[in-house]
Image (spheres, rainbow, N blue to C red):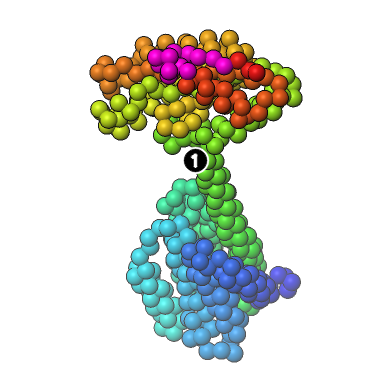
Amino acid sequence: MPSFDMKTVVIIFVLVNYSCAYLMAFTVNAGRKRFEGSAYLLANFVLQSVGMTLALMRPAVPAVFSVILANTLMFSGVIAFVFGAAKFTHRHVRRLPYLAYVALFVALYCQYTYVQPDIRIRTLCFAGMLIPVFLHLTLLLFFPRQQDYRKHCVHTGTTFLMFALLYCFRVYYAYSQDGMHNYFNGAPPTDALINTLSLLLTIFLMYSIQYMFNSRLISEAESYASRQLELLETMERLATEDHLTGIYNRRHIEGLIRSEVEIANRRSTPLSLILCDIDKFKNINDTYGHDMGDKTIVHTTGLLATHLRDMDKLGRWGGEEFIILTPHTTLEQAAAMAERLRALIAETPPPDLHGRQQVTFSFGVAQHKGGMSTAALIKNADQALYRAKQGGRNRVECTPGA
């Protein structure tokens, strides 16, 4: 089968490896800092390519270069991939055992090149010693330190598992052969087929490496986008929520009031506003400390928030003062709501005060009328609250719309 001879296959294999090395060089240049171990992966293709090139130069080049150095470079290329895969998967691999393994490989090749020349045994050594390396690579890629990396590495790990299986067959076939005198000219078609399959696996390996890098890059981009979204949500929450109570802050509730006033003016729907604050709050701060004052604010805010309707909006107006926006609500309905809240707060003292002081609220209720501005509505509610304070506190006062 002249069209399927070993030398032709190896020449194609060399060209494919050089192409893979060229592509890997771009990948390394673009992602050296992002993808650990990429330089080792490039080294694999470079060493494989140079080693095969030297092997093709036989018999014009001495055996020390075309046999020993050539096969050592190809063998070392796979070892380099181990170090690159370990870095990519954040696994620790000791280098000294692998360096000793390479030294053993060189010693065996010297033995069966000069002392006992035997191509078949050299083939057995090359394939047999690479099988545990391929299996180690499979383990590194299937079981990375970070389990979420496994989805990135599974194709590359599968490729090396296939390499291991192919080389098991190569060992079996080399062992069953009677002998071989010239690797390129004397090898049977089966050897050429094995090298063709190795070539195809090398192409698939290049694809799987690119997938491994791109998959991780996409995953990192998605993770970054998710963190950015979380950060934006946090910033939005900080911009709208009161840091102590978790309800709307003054800036946001003021914007909501303006929006509802515009809707009420446009559609002539009822709208009321409740302004309230804690009675004699300064006494709580002065007597029990500001920490107790904060706990009182949090407690009473919780009572307000859990007893409002879904359509109602609660905000902290300032200090111990709060505002409740009640869309589609008449003055009478808002006043009844304020009365229920007043009674609830008076009957539910903060547990941290242990009954040492009663906590009460005063409420001012105002109703919006057609054409009324936001400022006028808030002013009416504030005037009603002032009357509640003047009237003895712990009470509800109303200001009808003008």
Residue 354: image location, x then y, percent: 25, 18
Against 19, residue 381 (above or below) is above
Crowd around label 1: few <14 · some 14–19 · many ≥20 (10 Å): some
Task: Give the number of marks.
Answer: 1
Q: Quadrant of the C terminus?
A: top right
Observer able to see residue 85: no
Amino acid type assigned to the residue bearing label 1 in the image:
Leu
Q: Is residue 19 above or below residue 370?
A: below
Q: Quadrant of residue 252?
A: top right
Q: Is residue 140 magenta?
A: no
Q: What residue is disc 1 on?
A: 238
Give the percent coordinates (x, y) of residue 368.
Answer: 64, 20
Residue at (34, 70) in percent of width and height: 96
**Residue that appears at 42% across and 52% down:** 145
Which image quarter: residue 367? top right
Of 290 and 215, the residue lying toward us: 290
378 or 304, which is in the foreground? 378
Relative horizontal placement of residue 347, taking residue 377 as reference (left or right): left
User: Residue 272: x, y in percent?
Assistant: 60, 19
Give the x, y percent position of residue 101.
38, 70
Picture residue at 35% right of the left edge, 26% below the top: 281
**Which residue corresponds to the image point at 32% horizontal and 20% vertical from the top-left?**
350
Residue 260 shows in this picture: yes
- Which residue is nearer to you in this view: 349 or 342? 342
The quarter of the picture where the N terminus appears is: bottom right
Tell whether position 389 is magenta: yes
Please indicate whether residue 396 sits to the left or right of residue 8 in the image.
left
Q: Is residue 50 left or right of residue 83?
A: right
Read off the magenta span.
387-399
Mark 1: secondary structure: helix
